[in-house]
Amino acid sequence: MQEVYKIIKERIPVTIITGFLGSGKTTLLKNIIQKNSNTRFAIIENEFGELGIDGELVAAENSSVYELTNGCICCSLSREFYNSLQIIVEKQNDIDHLLIETTGIADPVSVIDLFISNNTLEKYFQINSVICLTDASSLENTLDNEIDARKQIALSDLVIINKVDKASNSQLENLKDRIADINPMAEIVKTSYAQTNGTPLLQTHAYSSSHVEKTTKSLCNINVSLHDLARSGSIDVEEMKNHRHDIHAEGFIFDECFDLELFNIWMSSYLYFNHSTLYRVKGILNFKDKDTRSIFQAVKGSYIFEDGTEWKENETRYSKIVFIGKSIDRAELEKSLQKLFQRFNSKSKRISA
């Protein structure tokens, strides 16, 4: 992208709407616009076909729609996507929020990664959240057969189960469990006709350090996986296989503190070799000689550290980290993390000697 942008005082917040085919993404987009009539939107719509028809449905007096057709926003349309973003930045005084609706078969990780890893885009845009819309009537079958649908959930901050009027309470509870298994850090909302029902969608700040810290703190027993339960006999192995697919979350809690330098080296290497299967990582980390929590998050091969709240005096410090991806080997990952503590202790001994 050419450096022709003007300097702007505040970054434009970005909300990415994803979801499998037929889930109701355009209806959700229209509802957001109608319920935020004072917000000036820029809308990038990715239609997989020759004609972009949804733009007419979401057009509003105070909004600008940019339709991307004949390809997927995350690959063949990258240049057209960049051009749209350039136009949006040049009109930034007339835009309050950017909404991006991906095609139902898009891989959202590439779109998210653009706003995190691209230094130029990061100057002008800030991700607010990723919203995944799902169809309650077909979600179970979709999760069983479509890896893209599971991936969309894995990368989302909010998962909306739409069309709940077409499913029973037991089916909805099962869907919630399956979504939580893929992404335990996502908020889950049930609705019909893609109504938001008062859920704030434009002010979630899901990529801020405070939000990551809050959601990571709220997780309980994340270090107990289905594999652990199966080994202990708490659940049947066949039941585990039926319940869990390739994309899932693995979480760990450690009492030991990490060494920042060693963790950086390890994480850079781990993301490099697993960037195609590891979708998102979030965590609160305890580093030696640091008075504040370190808030960590990664998407694909990009990661950032930010300072969180201070550790209180006499507070038991901990590290809590969640990995979301495809076919994660929990035992190997835990073994690798434990080696970091061993190397740190060995390093400390050599320094003190």
Image: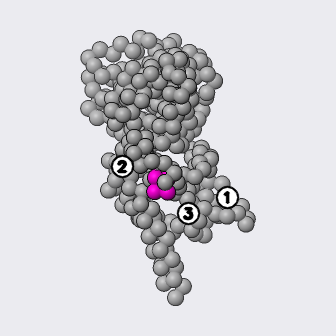
Q: Position of residue 296 (x, y in %)?
A: 52, 53
Name the residue beneath numbered marker 2: 327
Q: CA distance from mark 3 to mark 2?
A: 22 Å
Work out whether residue 208 can be spotted: yes
The disc placed on residue 254 is 3
User: Could you tell me the amino acid type at mark 1?
Assistant: Glu
Q: Is residue 286 visible?
A: no
Identify the secondary structure beneath mark 3: strand
Question: Between tags 3 and 2, which lies in front?
Answer: 2
Q: Which residue is at a point 45% across and 48% down the rendered structure image? A: 236
Q: Residue at x 39, y 20 (%)?
A: 22
Q: Secondary structure at mark 1?
A: strand
Q: Position of residue 165 (x, y in %)?
A: 53, 17
Which secondary structure is most common in the magenta stretch? helix
> What amino acid does circle 3 point to?
Phe
Return the residue at label 1: 310
Query: Which mark lies nearer to you, 2 or 1?
Result: 2
